[in-house]
Amino acid sequence: MSTAMTFGQKQFVPTPPDKGSFPLDHDGVCKKSMVQYMKCLLNNNSNNSFCRDEAKEYLACRMEHNLMAKEDWSKLGFQRESEER
């Protein structure tokens, strides 16, 4: 297998994701809420609209432990609790 580039071939330049990187949960601090969310998806044929509470709990855990940037819930697709009901 050759790794040489031909003249005129564009070189791939990776770009970071829009929201930044999402560190892995190496210590498993949010594993419980992640497993609950995954089980909910499994039980509902991957229809995430039935798993909003589990998703919100998982994202809250990630934000609390600095595994993702703290965001307003509306930016993550969640309305305020008074509007959801």
Image (cartoon, rainbow, N blue to C red):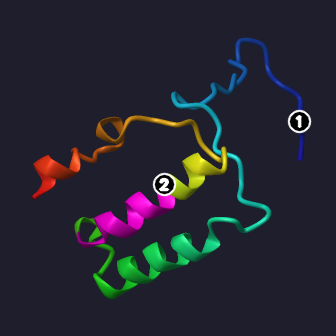
Q: Residue at x 44, y 73 (%)?
A: 37
For the stretch drawn in magenta, the main secondary structure is helix
Tell me the number on the disc at residue 3.
Answer: 1
Three-letter amino acid code at disc 2?
Leu
Mark 1 residue element: loop
| Position of residue 49 in the picture relative to residue 73 (left or right) | left
**How far apart in space, not on screen, are marks 1 and 2 (Cα)?**
41 Å
Q: Residue at x 33, y 66 (%)?
A: 53
Q: Is residue 32 above or below residue 84?
A: below
Three-letter amino acid code at disc 1?
Thr
| Position of residue 42 in the picture relative to residue 18 (left or right) | left
Residue 16 in the image: x percent, y percent? 63, 28
Q: Residue at x 10, y 58 (%)?
A: 85
Dots 1, 2 in contact, CB < 8 A: no
Q: Nearer the viewer, mark 1 or mark 2?
A: 2
Q: Residue at x 70, y 19 (%)?
A: 9
Tell me the number on the disc at residue 35.
Answer: none
Residue position marked by numbered label 2 in the rendering: 59
Mark 2 residue element: helix
53 in magenta: yes
- Magenta part of the chain: 50-59
77 in magenta: no
Asked where in the image residue 12 lies, by quadrant, the reply is top right
Residues packed near mark 1 inside 10 Å, few (<14), some (14 to 19) or many (20 plus): few
